[in-house]
């Protein structure tokens, strides 16, 4: 499986939206998404900054999607 690299927050938000999450609100520099089961994911959306691989991995795990499914998008 390929290594997770630093990711643009907008790319991660689009991936989460494809898997059924919808933006519920934004607080400051963080986007908050929820799905039908009321699972909440918080994604930092700082301008000009990438999300580090450890946090990307944690967000993917928390969202309940696999890296295999996420790499196909």
Image (cartoon, rainbow, N blue to C red):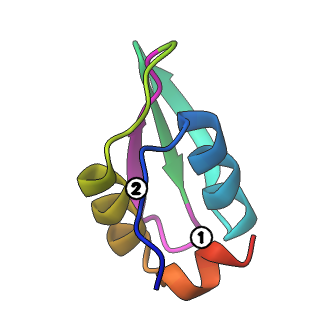
Q: In this view, does 40 lie above or below 46?
A: below
- Report the quarter where the C terminus lies: bottom right
Residue 52 shown in magenta: no
Q: Residue at (62%, 41%) from the top-left corner?
A: 23
Q: In this view, does 37 lie above or below 58?
A: below
**Disc 2 target residue:** 40
Q: Residue at (67%, 70%) from the top-left corner?
A: 19
Instruction: Decide which of 39, 53 is in the foreground and name it.
Output: 53
Q: Position of residue 21 (x, y in %)?
A: 62, 59
- Look at discs 2 and 1 and give the one toward the viewer: 2
Magenta range: 35-46
Q: Position of residue 22 (x, y in %)?
A: 65, 51
Left or right of 50: which side holds 70? Answer: right
Q: Where is residue 15 in the image (x, y as percent from the top left)?
A: 66, 58
Instruction: Decide which of 49, 10 is in the foreground and name it.
Output: 49
Left or right of 15: which side holds 66? Answer: left
Left or right of 72: which side holds 69? Answer: left
Q: Position of residue 28 (x, y in %)?
A: 40, 12
Query: What secondary structure is found at the residue carrying circle 2?
Result: strand
The crowding category of the residue bearing disc 2, from other C-alpha atoms within 10 Å (few below 14, some 14 to 19, many at least 20), is some
Residue 37 shown in magenta: yes
Kindly identify which numbered label has been placed on residue 53. none
**Disc 1 target residue:** 36
Instruction: Decide which of 30, 39 is in the foreground and name it.
Output: 30
Instruction: Decide which of 68, 3 is in the foreground and name it.
Output: 3
Q: Is residue 24 above or below residue 15?
A: above
The outermost residue toward the front is 2
Q: Do the residues labelled 2 and 1 touch (CB within 8 Å)?
A: no
Q: Residue at (42%, 44%) from the top-left corner?
A: 6
């Amino acid at each position: 499986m390929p290594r997770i690299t630093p990711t643009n927050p907008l790319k991660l938000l689009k991936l989460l939206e494809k898997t059924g999450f919808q933006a519920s609100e934004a607080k400051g520099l963080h986007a908050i998404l929820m799905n039908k089961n009321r699972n909440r994911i918080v994604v930092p959306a700082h301008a000009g900054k990438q999300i580090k691989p450890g946090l990307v991995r944690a967000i993917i795990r928390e969202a309940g999607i696999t890296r295999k499914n996420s790499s196909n998008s």
